[in-house]
Image: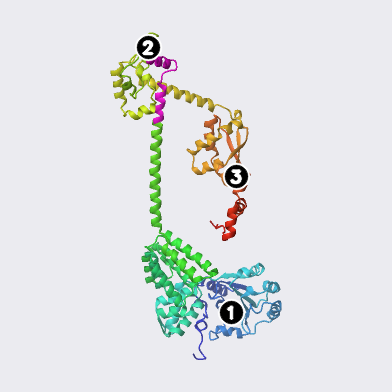
């Protein structure tokens, strides 16, 4: 390389506002201020590295003092009217005092004397304070221009005395366009994919992009090949990312491990690969929606590949993969064996269960749950039917006064009838007619007596007798006993049931009319267990479990005070207090309001102990466990993150 060679970052440094890339909001404001003669006495340019802060300051100084374009930007510092100061090495109070003395000297030629202070956040606090008065009221011929990448470190008193401009990161497309112009000017042959690789690695800094291109030219020459560029910049190619994701899609662990081994053998950095993989997964996620492809920083051909590859995964799968890779970036930094940790991370991606399969499993569980619920409902219905039949049979049993008579008659042989056994198996209730006959002392028992004289339980009769319709049963009874003098037994039974239901409703209404003040705390405690048992069948399990831990403490003016063990239980009870009060009203006949407080029980102290404390106490109580711990060095395996 000749002695006259200049790096691309210096050769292509802009000399006018129009040459500066992606900072139109700043350059337009400054050009209008110059045109209208409204220049401020102090400016502050903030933004990331390599976006043109110092370049903008030099262009402003050149334009204000009308310096000839032949003078290089780096040569402006050699003139007497433009002074550049590096605050990183001139950050003391003495340096600022010297600056204040030089500010008084007017410019030798030109209109303004311009001071450009780079990395101004590096000034000490005392240096900032020494600059305050001069910065607020400088001479008319002085303009201060500050540049910094960390404006939050600058004192607010300084920021309040300047006009602040925030510079933006330069987009990948703008960097690619600028690099293409430079390559054409330098007669460099480079493909668009390679330009995107350089632009993405520059991370929004055009100066870094020019430096990387200079490095690529030095390595590859005037004809830059994509593979050679990747080796020169130590960047994992997009092609390898697609290959690895293909292994993840096919769950091919062997292929994935082979790719990892090749990368490490070629000297690629693990962190660099994880960063690239994170970006690759992010692009796949964005590609799931074709309308958002402008967010993917890649060439048009690569964008099409992202769209095609994204169809293999769901959005949930990609989000889980992003989470795994992001966590791995932090874990590998502290890992003793980064390679193994790196392989474990990538194997997690390969063996990770897909969302589609998990949805199928959850759907199967839901179907099973529905089937079990249906079986439970059918079982409850059958149980209720059995109880109803049993209660009907019990209602039709003879009175205690009648039963001894029939028993004695059976003993004396007066009612011996060969048809009794067959008659007792009839499922329908007998008519009340035999009871009327039995009231006469010398009358013979009718043929219906054996039905009332049956000693078989109702459930046994129902098991032996097949189900028959109500009309068939009535016809059989008529054939056997004739018409009843008391009317239809079915109607009689229905009227009896209606009377019972009416009586029950009356009793409930009687209970409901009670005033809350008539209820005592002892009465609430007596029904509390049965109240909780009723809640079990009518409220969600979470509410039921929390109510099991709740205890009634005090009852005053219709307000029941409940003790809860924690804030969560209190919240659950407060949210359902009206619902819980309704269920308690069914028990005691009066509606009580619920109020809960948090007060831990002494029994909860044991539950609040950590597993380690419990394990220590267990060793004290059991010498065998203590001996095993001392003999084998056993420890309690407990993960605090679970």
Left or right side of 498 for 482: left
Mark 3 → mark 1, Cα distance in angstroms: 72 Å
Residue 212 pos. (x, y %): 48, 79
- Classify 604 as above or below 517: below
Residue 236 showing in the rendered view: no
Residue 202 showing in the rendered view: yes
Q: Which of marks 3 and 1 is in front?
A: 3
Q: Nearer the viewer, mark 3 or mark 2?
A: 2
Instruction: Find residue 437 and name its label.
Output: 2
Query: Under tag 3, what secondary structure?
Result: loop
- Magenta stretch: give its range: 386-412
Instruction: Find residue 565 and name its label.
Output: 3
Give the overall secondary structure of the magenta segment: helix
Left or right side of 221 for 428: left
As rendered, which of 359 and 409 lies closer to the eye?
Answer: 409
Residue drawn at point x = 40 percent, y = 39 percent: 376
Mark 3 → mark 2, Cα distance in angstroms: 67 Å
Query: Under tag 2, what secondary structure?
Result: helix
Query: Under tag 1, what secondary structure?
Result: helix
Instruction: Find residue 507 and name its label.
Output: none
Give the quarter of the image for residue 59.
bottom right
> Mark 2 and 1 residues: CB-CB less than 8 Å, in contact?
no
As rendered, which of 472 and 200 lies closer to the eye?
Answer: 472
Which residue is identified by label 1? 61
């Amino acid at each position: 390389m000749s002695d006259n060679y200049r790096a691309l970052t210096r050769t292509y440094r802009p000399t006018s506002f129009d040459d500066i890339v992606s900072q139109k909001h700043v350059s337009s404001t400054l050009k209008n201020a110059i045109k209208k003669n409204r220049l401020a006495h102090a400016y502050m340019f903030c933004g990331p590295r390599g976006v043109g802060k110092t370049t903008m300051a030099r262009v402003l100084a050149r334009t204000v003092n009308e310096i000839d374009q032949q003078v290089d930007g780096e040569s402006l510092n050699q003139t007497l009217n433009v002074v550049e100061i590096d605050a990183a090495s001139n950050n003391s109070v003495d340096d600022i005092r010297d600056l204040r003395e030089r500010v008084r000297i007017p410019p030798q030629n030109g209109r303004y004397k311009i001071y450009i202070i780079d990395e101004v956040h590096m000034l000490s606090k005392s240096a900032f304070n020494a600059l305050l008065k001069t910065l607020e009221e400088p001479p008319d011929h002085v303009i201060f221009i500050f540049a910094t990448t960390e404006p939050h470190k600058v004192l607010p008193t300084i920021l309040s005395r300047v006009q602040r401009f925030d510079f933006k990161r330069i987009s990948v497309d703008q960097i690619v366009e600028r690099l293409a112009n430079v390559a054409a000017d330098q007669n460099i042959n480079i493909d668009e994919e390679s330009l995107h690789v350089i632009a993405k690695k520059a991370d929004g800094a055009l100066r870094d992009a020019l430096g990387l291109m200079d490095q690529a030219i030095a390595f590859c020459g005037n004809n830059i090949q994509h593979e050679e560029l990747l080796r020169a910049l130590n960047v994992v190619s997009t092609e390898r990312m697609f290959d690895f994701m293909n292994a993840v899609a096919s769950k091919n662990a062997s292929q994935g491990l082979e790719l990892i081994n090749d990368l490490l053998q070629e000297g690629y950095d693990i962190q660099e690969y994880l960063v690239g993989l994170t970006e690759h997964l992010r692009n796949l996620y964005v590609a799931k929606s074709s309308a958002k492809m402008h967010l993917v920083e890649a060439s048009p051909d690569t964008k099409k590949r992202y769209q095609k590859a994204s169809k293999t995964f769901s959005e949930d799968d990609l989000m889980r993969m992003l989470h795994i890779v992001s966590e791995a970036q932090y874990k590998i930094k502290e890992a003793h064996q980064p390679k193994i940790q790196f392989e474990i991370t990538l194997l997690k991606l390969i063996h990770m269960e897909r969302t589609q399969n998990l949805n199928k499993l959850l759907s199967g569980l839901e179907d099973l749950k529905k089937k079990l619920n249906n079986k439970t409902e059918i079982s409850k219905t059958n149980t209720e039917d059995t109880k109803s039949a049993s209660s009907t049979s019990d209602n039709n049993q003879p009175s205690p006064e009648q039963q001894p008579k029939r028993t004695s008659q059976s003993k004396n042989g007066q009612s011996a009838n060969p048809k009794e056994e067959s008659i007792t198996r009839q499922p329908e209730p007998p008519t009340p007619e035999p009871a009327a006959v039995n009231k006469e002392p010398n009358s013979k028992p009718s043929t219906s007596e054996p039905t009332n004289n049956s000693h078989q339980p109702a459930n046994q009769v129902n098991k032996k007798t097949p189900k028959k319709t109500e009309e068939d049963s009535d016809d059989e009874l008529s054939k056997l006993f004739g018409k009843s003098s008391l009317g239809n037994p079915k109607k009689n039974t229905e009227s009896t049931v209606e009377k019972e239901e009416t009586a029950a409703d009356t009793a409930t209404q009687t209970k409901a009319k009670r005033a809350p003040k008539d209820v005592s705390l002892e009465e609430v405690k007596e029904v509390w267990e049965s109240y909780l048992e009723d809640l079990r069948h009518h409220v969600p399990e979470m509410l039921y479990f929390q109510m099991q831990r709740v205890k009634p403490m005090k009852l005053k003016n219709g307000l029941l005070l409940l003790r809860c063990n924690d804030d969560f239980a209190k919240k659950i009870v407060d949210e359902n207090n009206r619902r819980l009060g309704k269920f308690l009203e069914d028990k005691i006949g009066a509606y009580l309001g619920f109020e809960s407080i948090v007060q831990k029980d002494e029994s909860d102290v044991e539950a609040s102990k950590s597993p380690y404390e419990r394990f220590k106490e267990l060793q004290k109580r059991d010498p065998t466990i203590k001996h095993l711990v001392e003999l084998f060095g056993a420890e309690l395996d407990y993960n605090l993150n679970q």
